[in-house]
């Protein structure tokens, strides 16, 4: 039972954030329904699954760095609990991350990143190309230097989503296969019916802005294309660590999977709700990946896909009350998997009438004014 009785909670959105919130709330004793016509089919299904707040740090985004680091620290326990609750693997990979550079400008960017991280109390190891190839022999000669970030992890997104669905089901979450049209205190309006609730949680990714006026104009779609490839018997094996660019200024990542696969990503375009994979996107992904891992040309091409990341103007997510009875847990951009443990914890604290962790305050919708 929850601390305030078995309140009725409706979570709108069945990606990594919505399913994590639903699982944690149901496990805490809330009566939870999750509304989504096609759970785990959006950006979470396409994601690379990097848990990399250090490698993705950027000057001016200190609050996002603190938020991501706080959630990363929660991931090992979150993964262990998820495995126990679901009876399935969590998909967490603990090998770490390498951030590598090809040309002089890329390496200068990495030097600036290392200096910035040192100022923020985060230490990374600067490595030569030869040292990087000792760690990952499949890296090519174009890689001249980089950083080792052992604390940045990764997760197989589809393995994790399956485990989250199983854990949520075991905890008693009822899945409602429907489209939500709007959310208001006390109810979620569906296409042909209404689901009543005590608290609604909007976790609908890029569709969140359509559901409540407090999010209108605040969440926008940012398209990302990815490729999935797999090593064939005649090819060099993939790296065990996540490897990421820049490559000639373009951010590139290669995230390993347990089956000898790699996820190559990701393009970034603001083109509305377009989810078609383009020839140019595929070309750039392959060309940049070959700079880092030349042997990838011998891999099997398994899948191409595009997803829509829910972005905000300041790149921070939206976690908190929009009004009494309506919570937001959306706008996570590239960090949905990274921020899932902390977001679920924060929403549960708010459902119980408490306060989330201090780092979450930066993500409160009240930062825009007009907070009710």
Image (spheres, helix red, strand yellow):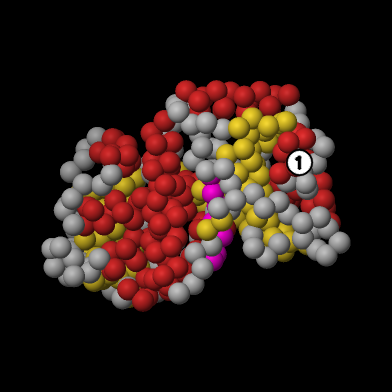
- Quadrant where the N terminus sits is bottom left
Give the quadrant of residue 110. top right
Q: Position of residue 178 (x, y in %)?
A: 38, 71
Which residue range is magenta in the image?
152-159
Q: Residue furthest right?
A: 234
Q: Secondary structure at mark 1?
A: helix
Residue at 86% from the left image edge and 61% from the top image edge: 234
Query: Which residue is more in the foreground, 244 or 314?
Result: 244
Q: Is residue 130 above or below residue 324?
A: above
Q: Position of residue 188 (x, y in %)?
A: 27, 64
Residue at 21% from the left image edge and 61% from the top image edge: 199
Q: Is residue 12 above or below residue 88?
A: above
Query: Which residue is more in the foreground, 48 or 235?
Result: 235
Residue at 44% from the left image edge and 31% from the top image edge: 61
| Magenta segment includes 157 | yes
| Magenta segment includes 273 | no
Q: Position of residue 208 (x, y in %)?
A: 37, 53
Q: Is residue 344 left or right of residue 163?
A: left
Q: Position of residue 128 (x, y in %)?
A: 72, 31
Residue that badge 1 annotates:
133
Q: How many marks?
A: 1
């Amino acid at each position: 039972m929850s601390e305030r009785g078995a309140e009725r909670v409706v979570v709108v959105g069945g990606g990594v954030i919505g399913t994590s919130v639903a699982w944690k709330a149901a496990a805490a004793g809330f009566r939870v329904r999750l509304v989504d016509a096609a759970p785990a089919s959006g950006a979470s299904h396409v994601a690379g699954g990097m848990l990399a707040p250090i490698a993705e740090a950027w000057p001016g985004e200190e609050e996002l760095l603190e938020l991501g680091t706080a959630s990363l620290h929660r991931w090992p326990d979150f993964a262990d609990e998820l495995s126990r609750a679901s009876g399935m693997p969590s998909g967490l990979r603990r090998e770490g991350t390498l951030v590598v550079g090809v040309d002089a400008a890329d390496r200068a960017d990495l030097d600036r990143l290392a200096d910035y991280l040192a100022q923020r109390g985060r230490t990374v190891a600067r490595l030569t190309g030869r040292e990087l190839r000792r760690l990952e022999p499949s890296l090519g000669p174009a890689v001249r230097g980089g950083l080792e970030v052992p604390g940045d992890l990764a997760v197989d997104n589809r393995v994790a989503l399956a485990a989250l669905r199983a854990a949520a089901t075991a905890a008693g979450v009822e899945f409602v296969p429907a489209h939500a049209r709007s959310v208001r205190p006390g109810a979620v309006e569906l296409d042909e019916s209404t689901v009543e609730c005590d608290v609604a949680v909007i976790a609908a990714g890029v569709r969140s802005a359509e559901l409540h006026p407090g999010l209108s104009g605040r969440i926008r779609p940012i398209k990302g294309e990815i490729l999935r490839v797999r090593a064939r018997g005649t090819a060099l094996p993939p790296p065990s660590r996540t490897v990421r660019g820049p490559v000639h200024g373009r951010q590139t990542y290669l995230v390993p999977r347990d089956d000898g696969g790699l996820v190559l990503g990701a393009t970034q375009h603001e083109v509305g709700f377009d989810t078609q994979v383009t020839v140019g996107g595929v070309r750039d992904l392959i060309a940049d990946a070959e700079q880092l891992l030349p042997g990838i040309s011998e891999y099997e091409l398994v899948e191409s896909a595009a997803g829509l990341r829910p972005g905000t103007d300041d790149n921070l997510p939206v976690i908190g009350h929009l009004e009494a009875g309506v919570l937001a847990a959306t706008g996570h951009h590239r960090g949905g998997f990274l921020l899932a443990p902390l977001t679920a914890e924060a929403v549960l604290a708010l459902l119980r009438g408490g306060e989330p962790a201090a780092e979450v305050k930066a993500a409160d919708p009240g930062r825009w004014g007009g907070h009710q």
